[in-house]
Image: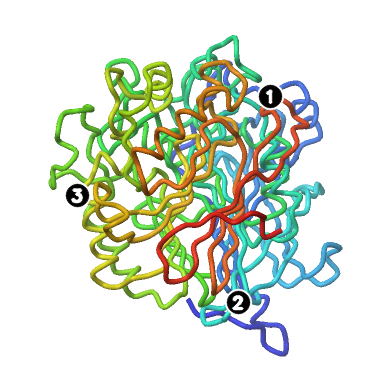
Amino acid sequence: MTSLLPSSDGATRRRSVLKTVAAGAALAPLAGTAALGTATARAAEAAPAFLHGVASGDPLPDGVLLWTRVTPTPDAAPGSGLGPDTDVSWEVAEDKGFTSVVSSGTATASAASDHTVKADVRGLRPATAYWFRFSAGGTVSAVGRTRTAPAHDERASGIRFGVVSCANWESGYFSAYRHLAARTDLDAVLHLGDYIYEYATGGYPEAKYVVRQHEPKHEITSLADYRTRHGRYKTDQDLQALHAAHPVVAIWDDHEFANDAWSGGAENHTPGTEGDWAARVAAAKQAYFEWMPVRPSVAGTTYRRLRFGSLADLHLLDLRSFRSEQVKVGSGKVDDPERTITGRAQLDWLKSGLAASDATWKLVGTSVMISPVAFGSLPAHLLEPLTELLGLPGGGLAVNVDQWDGYTDDRKELLNHLTQRNITNTVFLTGDIHMAWANDVPVTAATYPLSKSAATEFVVTSVTSDNIDDMLHVAPQTLSLAAAAAVKLANRHVKWVDMDSHGYGVLDITAQQSQMDYYVLSDKRRQDATASWTRSYRTLTGTQKVERVYQPVR
């Protein structure tokens, strides 16, 4: 993917490739599930309208993917299958006032794609900020800002990413997104999964703890359902602000489909009453690619690779589409070499990509934790809510079988590959577990630190999804400090864990180090929640170990 630099006459700069989201057949309306709410319904009366914001994603040295959704008529709500074809124009400029437009084009939004539009724009300059907007029928969208990646061989002085995961609409407000949107120093935001949740209203958390209700209110299973849920999420002003401020690089985890999903089903899927799993997954993936600023790759999955100059290669994984079913805790089958979390093709792709990389840092976006963790040493009053949080049966939880701990042969093969090929500076970036962690990733946990660390791992906590204090309904840090101490004692490669807070991370990368600064929210149930720095950990180049530092990079 060689950068296309602008020619002197500007012709190359204006070259672009337009990709409009394609869908299957248009759907019949789903009664009672497509309401936008009173405020957005009033806004839609002046159709066409851009009610769901604008977004960009997957930055390249010469381009970026742009996204929006147009509401052509008031009845053309997400998932409705209604509304006429509508021409949507887009512009990319070097300035916010659009006096220097460098690329433009037109696409047709239709009910077949839920009136979403994507433009895969090329011919831009590397490491450059651009502004973009859409228009339809005389209506102009909000203005978004994006940024291209450094040239592939550029020795960038630094790269900085916001890092988030696990945003349950009903559990609170998306203040973490607002605080990241306000930063002007980010190259992109990494979303490591659980961008949406599939549950019915009151299913998680309990109805009495719901802050705001899902739409649709039932559990989502059909294409119309998933489209409506995505549309509901993108009415959130903080989420819109995030997408308008920074390009987003996203992968999915399980809740974009159903809890604890695997290649043939999910814990939260009942074939007899909720239909065929393959049909549900196809619907969920179609809605995801319609509504997210993500380029589909490898037969409709999210595993792909982005490069940020010679400083970092970012390998993004899909750990749901190809994995074997989770085994029962204590079954002894976690070590079965026939079981996989990545699938053979994806693991080979990852290994070859890591071996071939000449970047200083090899970043791996993984939706579930790769570091081994045993929880069995926790006291019963903490083990019970932790078991519930992880969605596992009780009775003495030892490992979380939904993580790489449930697929140890794949992990062993990958970590041995890193050590045998002398691949250094591999950093796993992880979400899913609703806690913040800083870990060494040992080849053999039982003998660590006498054995090698093959990599390091930074895990970010949830934006809103429940963690220990939420499940126990106690003040943060009331009980979890003792639990964290017990986890660290039993797992010597774990350097820090915060089981209570909600928030986000900021990853700063230079040639010398990768540092994760952890930020926590004052109260996820308040729209005006503040954010404050809490901890920082870094990996110095060549060490494969994390160490604490006592101030954030910025």
Q: Is residue 106 above or below residue 87?
A: below
Q: Secondary structure at mark 3?
A: helix
Q: Is residue 420 above or below residue 471?
A: below
Alpha-carbon distance for marks 1 and 2? 39 Å
Q: Is residue 77 above or below residue 155?
A: above
| Nearer-N-terminus badge (3/1) | 3
The percent position of residue 389, horizontal first and vertical second, equals 43, 25
Classed neighbour count for the residue bearing mark 1: other residues with Cα under 10 Å, few (<14), some (14–19), many (≥20) = some
Give the amino acid at mark 3: Asp
| Nearer-N-terminus badge (1/2) | 2
Q: Is the residue under label 2 in contact with that under label 1 (CB below 8 Å)?
A: no
| Nearer-N-terminus badge (2/3) | 2
Left or right position of 175 against 195? right
The percent position of residue 48, horizontal first and vertical second, equals 75, 40
Considering depth in this image, is 302 or 377 the residue closer to the camera?
A: 377
Does any portion of residue 124 appear in the rendered image?
A: yes
Find disc 1 in the rendering and name its residue: 525
Classed neighbour count for the residue bearing mark 3: other residues with Cα under 10 Å, few (<14), some (14–19), many (≥20) = some
Image point 57% across, 66% down: which residue? 509
Alpha-carbon distance for marks 2 and 3? 36 Å
Image point 28% across, 22% down: which residue? 396
The percent position of residue 32, horizontal first and vertical second, equals 58, 16
Give the amino acid at mark 2: Ala
Considering depth in this image, is 71 or 431 the residue closer to the camera?
A: 431
Does any portion of residue 346 appear in the rendered image?
A: no
Alpha-carbon distance for marks 3 and 1? 41 Å
Find disc 3 in the rendering and name its residue: 409
Find disc 2 in the rendering and name its residue: 156
Residue extending furthest toward the bottom: 8
Give the amino acid at mark 1: Arg
Q: Is the residue under label 3 in contact with that under label 2 (CB below 8 Å)?
A: no
